[in-house]
Amino acid sequence: MATEDGMERGRPEVGPPAAEAEAIWKSFGRTKALQDVSVSVAPGECHALVGRNGAGKSTLVAVLTGLLKPDRGSVRLYGEPAPGLGDRAAWQERVACVYQRSMVIPSLSVGENIFLNRSESSLVRWHELRRQARQLLLGWGFDLDVDQPAAELSVEQKQIVEIARALASGARFLILDEPTASLESHAIERLFERVRRVKASGVAILYISHHLEEVYEICDRATVLRDGKRVVSAPVAELDHEHLVAAMVGGELARTVREQTALRDDVDERPRLRVRSLSVQTPLGSVEDVSLEVHAGECVGLFGLRGSGTAAIADAIAGLVKPSAGEIELDGGALQPGKVDVALRRGVGYVPEDRHARGFVPTMGVVENLTLPVLELLCKWGIVSSVRRREAAETIAERLQIVAASGEQPLSELSGGNQQKVVVGRALAARPSLLVVVSPTVGVDVASKEALLGVVDRAREEGTAVLLVSDDLDELRICTRVLVVRRGSIVMELREPPWDRHQLIAAAEGLGTAA
């Protein structure tokens, strides 16, 4: 069994590990990023590395890829000492990392990206380069045109190019850093098939993800980091969800989350939100003749693939886009189409998916961002009271456990999890009667994810109507109902949690029967 004693269990000892970090220590000033961390990844193994933001994952990856030198400890690759920090070519031949943010060069073709910096002379045989790139892609079952400009590739296709580039370099230790962050569910399934294929060839994979269901889907073992220390390393089969979360965030927080996410069925008879025959067109998805209702004290999930129209519904309700037809009512009164300020005054709180573009002002401080929606309430004789503004912000920050050096610290300096907490806190500042949230936990660590979902669920418990738009099945667990949207229409409604993962995906992809 796995225990929080730092011991590693369940790895078959067949030959040397593909990668092995032993007793790694790394500090940045007074911050101890890694403290006596050991981890090994065997050939043909997919090994999960999980932990909340600040646990030490990025630092360990930097050590394993030769970007950082540990203060103490050693790294071995296939039984041999790791190259020196300055020998980048030697590192690239042994280990490759596919980062969450694409490193593909848009101005180059697929083939050129795959063999970037691989030519040993200034003379490039373009025909031979394309032939080798095509052969490599076909050999791994990847279907891409080697002459296609990388700028035209989808997120999934760029990821394929990066994996192919790693394999072309000869690296047999592959690090995948949040590989599903920007992928739809069907693209995620295809990624998993590629991971299985690469793993079967003997390539070792270190898989980093905030989505625990992916760990159980694709990984053989898992290592959990917390506060710079390794607390668990064991076969995934020995780690159930509760123990894994407890290892990452501590048992007390895990118990709190379970209590916060208990579902209740009591709702008012009259709907808080009523959408009738809504039609709206946006570049990222459109809907036609959609109707739905959300009651006070209810959390309704809108689940669908990207482009299905779920985000278009949310944007229309929040006043960001103007519908071409239909009505949106809040508490029995019509909302003025395409008017964000009217929606806010009427009691609509909105949490956008892209917090950087829509959620906050990065150069403003925590206090300023949290209180932007309630400035009118903090005014006296037309002047905003700094004392009342700070008090209001501190109340929200305490409720959401926002960690910042001070109320004046710019949002751009906060971690992703704390930035998202500010976005949610800002939406809740005016005590909205309807809260519309779109993928509220994208890109945040597990602890922040649990805290954010707990806050949204608590708002529902206190009587707020919640519309949760998400393609993350784990976020849907706080919902009391789920509507599945496909190609602009609601094709299924589920009323009895827990939600069946396969049923939801089948309906979203058009493989199920509408209910």
Image: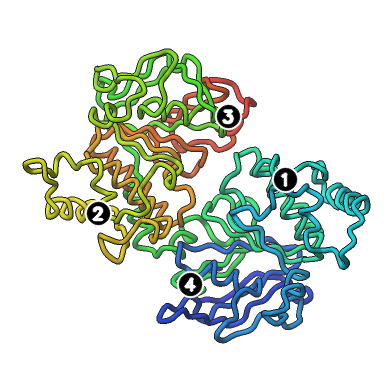
The residue that mark 4 highlights is: 4
Dividing the picture into quadrants, the one containing residue 256 is: bottom left
Q: Is residue 403 left or right of residue 507?
A: left
Q: Earlier in the sequence, mark 1 or mark 4?
A: 4
Q: Name the residue under label 2.
A: 367
Name the amino acid type tagged 3: Ala
Q: Name the residue under label 3.
A: 508
Rounded to the nearest angstrom, the CA distance separating label 1 from label 2 is 42 Å
Between disc 2 and disc 4, whose residue precedes? 4
Query: Vertically, is 359 above or below 132?
Result: above
Kindly report which numbered mark, 2 or 4, lies closer to the viewer in this rendering.
2
Quadrant of the rendered image containing residue 121: bottom right
Secondary element under disc 3, as helix, strand or loop, is: helix
Indicate how the structure is coloured in the image. rainbow
Judged from the image, the secondary structure of the residue bearing numbered disc 1 is: helix
Asked if residue 266 shows in the view, the reply is no
Mark 4 Cα within 10 Å, few/some/many (few <14, many 20+)?
few
- What amino acid does circle 1 point to? Ala
Q: Nearer the viewer, residue 123 or 38?
A: 123
